[in-house]
Amino acid sequence: MLTKIREKSQGTLAWVILTLICVPFALWGINNYLDGGGEKPVASVGDKDFYQRDVNKAYEQYSQNLQGMNIDEPTLKAQALQKLIKDEVLLQYVHTEGLVVTDNEARDFIKSLPYFQVDGKFSEKQYKSLLGSQRISSTEFVNRIKNALTMEQFQHSVMDSSFATQFDVESFFKIQNQQRDVDYIIVPVSPLNEQPKSEEITAYYQQHQDLFQTPEQVSVEYVELSLDELSKKVVVTDDKLKAFYEEQKDQYTTPERRKISHILIAINDKTTEKQALEKALKAKQDLASKDFSVVAAEVSDDKLTAKKGGDLGLFNLGSMEKAFEDAASSLKLGEVSNPVKSAFGYHLIKVTELVPSSVKSFEIAKPEVAKAYQKSQAENAFYEAGEKLTEMSYEHPDSLQTVADGLSLVVQKSSLFTKDKGEGVATDEKIRNAAFSEEVLQGNNSAPIEQPSERLIVLRLLEHKTAAKKDIAEVKDEIAAELVKEKAQRLALEKAKKIQVSLEAGTSIQSVASENKVEIKSEKGLVRGKNKLPEYLSDAIFKAAKPIGDKPSVFLTVLPSGEQVVVSLSKVTTGTMSEDDKKQLELAKKNIAKTLGQTEFNQVLNSLQAEADVEVNKKPQAQ
């Protein structure tokens, strides 16, 4: 239940489909479909206007997809707006071109979405309930899905026509497997003992006041619907538990444990089927006087297992060919089969360990059975309560107490927390994102937020503290430390630049290192993505210009620690395909073609946007 749609959506237009699926658990709410009134649109594509709330809702979905990438909110909102514009440009184009998806295709897609399924099957009740809570008709919803699928159909028509030639593959590996020889010097950031003057501290404080603020904080009140809590209320009796136990007996059964070894005589260019059979029969005769592991080591063509006496480990049905499995399943402990033919050759199979299957008795399994029974019985109640939670929190957006009373839940409260960190319920990033969303900050209940262990939480704002400027006395020491660090890094950069100038003038790196009392480090045959250098340094080396003639390419780069690195790139060797690369040639072609196809689609989309009637009235605000 409540499986995330984005885990099932296919194609790079999945985000479009997500924003079109306007169900209560999604982030794209009913307000998106209300009239803009007197509000000025943020952007327009033809006759389609987008308002700030559209950008805010799109941003919420967009930011979830890019979690962990440390992109600031204004930038993400600008990207979300561009995504809205591009999607609308594409939608208008496919309509102009007369591309369509049938009603049946759209309905088949909808039925495949886990959001509308109960016990793995499409539920008409679930479907109507979720759409009804957002005041969206089935016809409107199907049309939106048809639009999204049509857009994806066009995208695939562009991308799937792309292909990679042998030249493309060879060019890729020339770059991917390229080798570079470098010498480099790390210029450390030396600690300074001096302290900045009070005027410097004051000037820095006035120029960087945005850095010295207490972060925005909120606290929330919330109600939590939990499957576990509902389960505890389910009354159990021995008769019900015994019936459930019999229905679910497989869950309390330990399957037979069967460990096997084999000797393989392979059929190949050097050994015919007849010869392989004769060798297998000879090997079985040898078992009369030799141990199985000895014969396996001597004659088995499965060299990996031969070293371990032919041991294949635990035998699992479905992992081998039928003839092999039939033989392995019928043998007694210690018994060796007659030669068994597979696609690989002839096998002699031996069972080396056999533990019969066992069933945990009802008395022993009773605590497990009771817990499983209660959970199974509570699932329907949880689903129905989830629907009610969604409806009530939407119908009574200004109160949680009404929701709590209607579902016999307790209104709980959190302590203050920020966007980045919180305790208790606010340790979860999804909770923090919802708490700082525009909807909640405006005083409305949130949409139900899915939590681990089958829990749903609805929250509303309790207290909101805006960011406030810190007094200079509070941050004086912090600023002083920053100024000292900046000066130390500046001195390191100046020293690095002098070293760079000397190297570019032709002075040997050994002389420069000796003069500046720094260490030279050398790397030969560096390969992209397969070296132990810091990522920042490796990236800079492989982005650097190639040396011209005998003159090395000298450049500076900086590490996250602030240390400067002076690099002398002396040699670049064109990459070639390795034997392993050749084995993966078809996969490489496929991936390169996919990349080329995505690039081509982006170019087509940019071209369509350039030709479309697009107007952006202002940059989206970080509200």
Image (cartoon, rainbow, N blue to C red):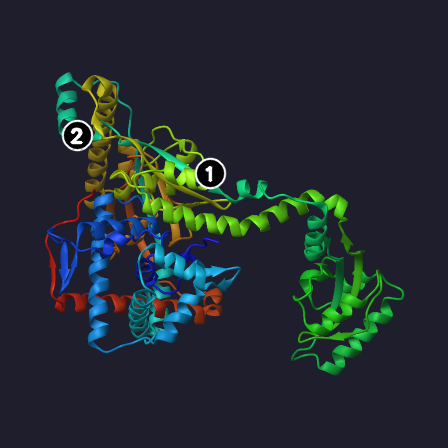
Q: Viewer-nearest of labels 1 and 2?
A: 1
Crowd tier of the residue under label 2, counting other residues whose Cα lies within 10 Å: few below 14, some 14–19, many 20 or above = few
Which residue is label 2 attached to? Answer: 208
* Residue 493 % position (x, y): 22, 35
Q: Label 1 is placed on what type of residue?
A: Ser
- The dot on residue 66 is none
Relative height, residue 380 to residue 103 (above, below):
above
* Residue 556 % position (x, y): 24, 43
Q: Quadrant of residue 324?
A: bottom right
Which residue is label 1 attached to? Answer: 408
Mark 2 residue element: loop
Residue 548 at least partly seen = no
Q: Label 2 is placed on what type of residue?
A: His
Mark 1 residue element: loop
> Could you tell whether 330 is left or right of 199 in the image?
right
Q: How many discs mark residues in the rendered view?
A: 2
Q: Nearer the viewer, residue 153 or 19?
A: 19
Residue 362 at least partly seen = yes
Image quarter (top left, top right, bottom left or bottom right) of the C terminus = top left
Q: Are marks 1 and 2 in contact (CB under 8 Å)?
A: no
* Residue 411 % position (x, y): 41, 33
